[in-house]
Image (spheres, rainbow, N blue to C red):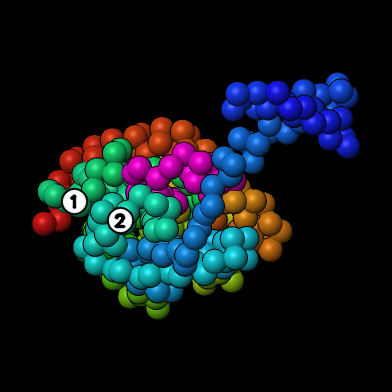
Amino acid sequence: MREVWGAVGVQVSISEGIVKISFKNKYLYVFLGVCCIAAPVVAAEPQWPTRPVRVMVPFAPGGTTDVIARIIASKMTELSGQQWIVDNRPGAGGNIGTGIVANAAPDGQTVLVNSSAYVVNPGLYKSIPYDPYTSFIPLTNFAASPNLFSAHTSVTAKTLADVLKLAQADPKKFAFATPGIGTTPHLAVEMLRYAVKMDLNNIPYNGAGQSVGAHLSGQVNLACSALPTPAPHVKAGRLRGLAMASAKRHAAFPDVPTMAEAGYKDQESETLQGVYFPAGVPVAIVKKFHADLMKIGNMPDVRERVTGLGFDFVLSTPDEFMRQTRVEVEKWKRVVKNANVQVQ
């Protein structure tokens, strides 16, 4: 047997091919023990992302979902040291881009940023290329905006109740412009129509920009849309806010009542902005990305930009977002069924 004492008090003995290590200094023993315990924790930090990340937006550039995605992509590029590249794949109400991500490799290199289309489409379409509960890991509802019922200033009625009386008396004269069939503003009108048991004309446009443009010009005297698009026009007095489809009044529009305050309960609806991974992404990467999203959502410049668009931050946990997803999917299925709306 051969024994060797190192300069730092470590004895190494070799006997019949077996190596034994002893310590003269108990503090050194404790120190090395702590290092050994801590080592697995350090090793657990995921090496992610390892290459540029694709951020899928299933809508055309320029919409609110695209804006939110580009804010996240820009900040994640700074935080991760890898490029985050937005990929716009519009079509089929968001189903095309969403389906691409559902079938992407679960390595954390592909991310989906989607609107409320994610929770509406399961009830709206006969067939969709994803399962809202199993195809994705819902990371967070990053931000959400309530839908706003509004009137052109040429409409004499000042409240939603009075507007509906006018619409009931002369249904051909009054109609709601909405961003398109199956959008939450369109379904909010259908939900109200079902509640008040009267016909409400809906004119679907190809996006919020077109619908609010027609509303602003007076072509359509009523509208329902997610708050960001009509917000500047309501502030400028060019449109009149009738009711906000939210549980409480919006801080930016304290004079606009909620739907419940306007006399119509259980009419809340919002346009969410969700962030998703395809199912199967490792837990360590999910936790890391979620933590980064929370960090981004609390950056002062991001908060100023997003709230300026008319959104409120939600920043939910994956578990909270999954619970919300289940509630929203079933809610909009009921609305779609009651309204007898379906897209092939």
Query: What residue is rendered at 49% in x and 60% in y?
Result: 50
Instruction: Please rate how many residues cluster around mark 2, counting C-alpha atoms within 10 Å: few if below 14, some from 14 to 19, many from 20.
Output: some
Q: For the residues marked 1 and 2, what is the alpha-carbon distance in whole angstroms?
A: 16 Å
Span shown in magenta? 274-291
Q: Which numbered dot is residue 128? A: 1
Q: Nearer the viewer, residue 202 or 37?
A: 37
Q: Which mark is residue 104?
A: 2
Q: Residue at x 54, y 66 (%)?
A: 82
User: On the rendered structure, is 16 left or right of 259?
Assistant: right
Q: Is residue 198 visible?
A: no
Three-letter code, disc 1? Ile
Identify the amino acid type marked 2.
Ala
Q: Residue at x 80, y 31 (%)?
A: 4
Rendered location of residue 162, percent (x, y): 40, 51
Q: Position of residue 241 (x, y in %)?
A: 50, 58
Q: Measured from the top left, where is residue 112 in percent x and y?
A: 39, 56
Residue 272 placement, left or right of 176: right
